[in-house]
Amino acid sequence: MVIGHRGNSAHAPENTVESFRQALALGVDGVEFDVRLSADGELVVIHDPTVDRTTNASGHVARLTLKQLREFDAGYRFGPTTYPYRDRGITIPTVAEALDSTAPLPVIIEVKSIEAAEPLVALVRQRRDEKRVTIGSFVPRALLPFRRAGMATSASFDEVRALLVPAVCRFRRAKLPFSMMTIPPAYRGVPLPVGALARCIAAAGASVYLWTINDPAEAVRFWHRGVRGILSDDPGAMIEARRRIG
């Protein structure tokens, strides 16, 4: 599978509706995006704790209201020289808008703050989007509300770490609390046993998804090792690589 990492983020402003629409037009199998909570309790799609890197403004997302966040140009800083997305009305979207613009594809939602967990559970339930959403987070406690609600999650950091030795020793796990393991190919410069992990969790119906892979040859190598999904900033290149290998 090819998953658009924050949409088509190599070619459009990340985590925006424009980026998601481009990813869908390329034919991705799913989309990944990030969620935080605004000062007035709204679920918004943005990776960083501040708006500084991706907009024409500055400030912490958690200290800004949705109305304030909507006034910022989310396409302002995209592009090394020409900035083609400036002043085109591209804003920070809400999670509801992100889900609308990616429907009906599966989505991976990265919860960046624990405060966003319970409101996101409520929104997904309200929309009846439980079957197309998988939740990931670097904050292990943020996954608990989703598991209690019976929603699919990815593995936490501690769960991945606990499986490293069993995977290398060729043990298999028949039951796991997660349906997906989203990991990088290396951690702090040390390669992870990606193929061994894929085999270890397969019997439980779980799959390995790798981020962030932008080299088509690298994607092909990992697919051959049993990786189910590639999260890429350049999903079009990954789709073409997959087409070439059939």
Image (cartoon, helix red, strand yellow):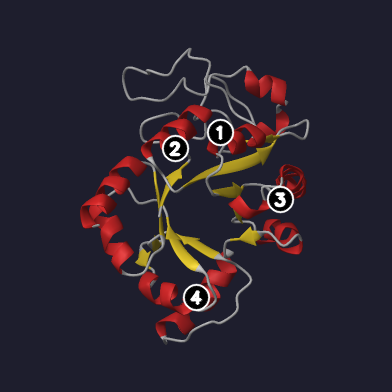
Q: Nearer the viewer, residue 39 or 196?
A: 196
- Residue located beneath label 1 in the image: 101
Residue contact at pointers 3 and 1, CB within 8 angstroms:
no
Sequence order check, earlier mark of 3 and 1? 1
Three-letter amino acid code at disc 2? Leu
Residue in the image at 60% along x and 29% along y: 93
Give how far apart the Cα atoms at labels 4 and 2 are.
Answer: 29 Å
- Residue located beneath label 2 in the image: 24
Relative to residue 59, is residue 213 depicted above or below?
below
Relative to residue 78, is residue 172 depicted above or below?
below
**Secondary structure category for the residue under label 3:** helix
Relative to residue 198, is residue 94 depicted above or below?
above
Three-letter amino acid code at disc 3? Ile
Give how far apart the Cα atoms at labels 2 and 1 are.
Answer: 9 Å
Q: Is residue 128 visible?
A: yes
Position in image of residue 48 (x %, y %): 56, 38
Give how far apart the Cα atoms at labels 3 and 4 are.
Answer: 27 Å
**Secondary structure category for the residue under label 1:** helix
Give left or right: position of 60 versus 121.
Answer: left
Q: Nearer the viewer, residue 175 or 66?
A: 175
Residue in the image at 39% along x and 77% along y: 196
Three-letter amino acid code at disc 4? Ile
Position in image of residue 152 (x %, y %): 63, 60
Relative to residue 197, is residue 106 depicted above or below?
above
Sequence order check, earlier mark of 4 and 2? 2
Residue contact at pointers 3 and 4, CB within 8 angstroms:
no
> Mark 4: few, some, or many residues within 10 Å (few <14, many ≥20)?
many
**Secondary structure category for the residue under label 2:** helix
- The residue mark sitting in front, 3 or 4, is 4
- Residue located beneath label 3 in the image: 114
Residue in the image at 31% along x and 47% along y: 239
Residue contact at pointers 1 and 4, CB within 8 angstroms:
no
